[in-house]
Image: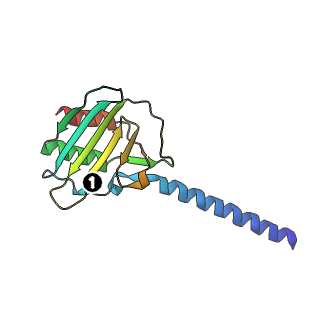
Amino acid sequence: MKKKTIRWVILLAVLLCATAWLLFLVDRQVAGQEIVSVSEISASCTVTVSKYRYIPGNERKEYILSAEQIQKLQTLILNSSFTKTHSSSIQYFDSDIYDIQVEFDRPLEPLSICCIGNEYISIRNQFGGKYLKIQNPQWKDTLEMILEN
């Protein structure tokens, strides 16, 4: 009888660990559609992108996006996926930083995204201040193409 109880306890513990692991994995994935207000971006918004390198004294390049560029940026974000990190600090290797600021024409809180190259994004007031690892290998190249047009 004692062996049977021990087996049930072990089985229950394994099931609980497996469930916790699955919940951990599911919680970590973020689709672009889950970013608040991205679906509200339209040609009537004012979208500004500041690009700079993380080197002291480096100049910022400011871009104000056209309607076509705004649509492409929205598509990039909506079609990308991300993974939550569980740390407030990260280690990155890309020195290109992009600050994306979206001002809506409706009474919505502005959307502010800080992007570190092709590695991470951080969205002010979303995801508990944690960084999101970019899972789209073409993110930076696509963002650069949007800015060039």
How packed is label 1: few (under 14 Cα within 10 Å), some, or many (20 or more)? some
Viewer-proximal residue, 9 or 36? 36
Rendered location of residue 128, percent (x, y) = 43, 55
Rendered location of residue 59, percent (x, y) = 25, 27
Seen as rendered, the residue at the extreme front is 57
Q: Quadrant of the N terminus?
A: bottom right
Q: Quadrant of residue 118?
A: top left
Viewer-proximal residue, 89 or 23? 89
Q: Residue at x 24, y 48 (%)?
A: 74
Q: Quadrant of residue 60?
A: top left
Q: Residue at x 30, y 33 (%)?
A: 141
Q: Quadrant of the C terminus?
A: top left
Q: Quadrant of residue 92?
A: top left
Rendered location of residue 23, percent (x, y) = 54, 59
Labels in figure, total = 1
Q: Which residue is mark 1?
A: 38
Task: Tell me which colouring the rendered structure shows.
Answer: rainbow
Left or right: 8 with respect to 36?
right
Left or right: 145 with respect to 30?
left
Viewer-proximal residue, 58 or 98? 58
Q: Residue at x 42, y 51 (%)?
A: 129
Amino acid bearing label 1? Val
What SS does tag 1 mark?
helix
Up the image or down, 138 lies above or below 80; here it is: above
Seen as rendered, the residue at the extreme bottom is 1
Rendered location of residue 31, percent (x, y) = 38, 53
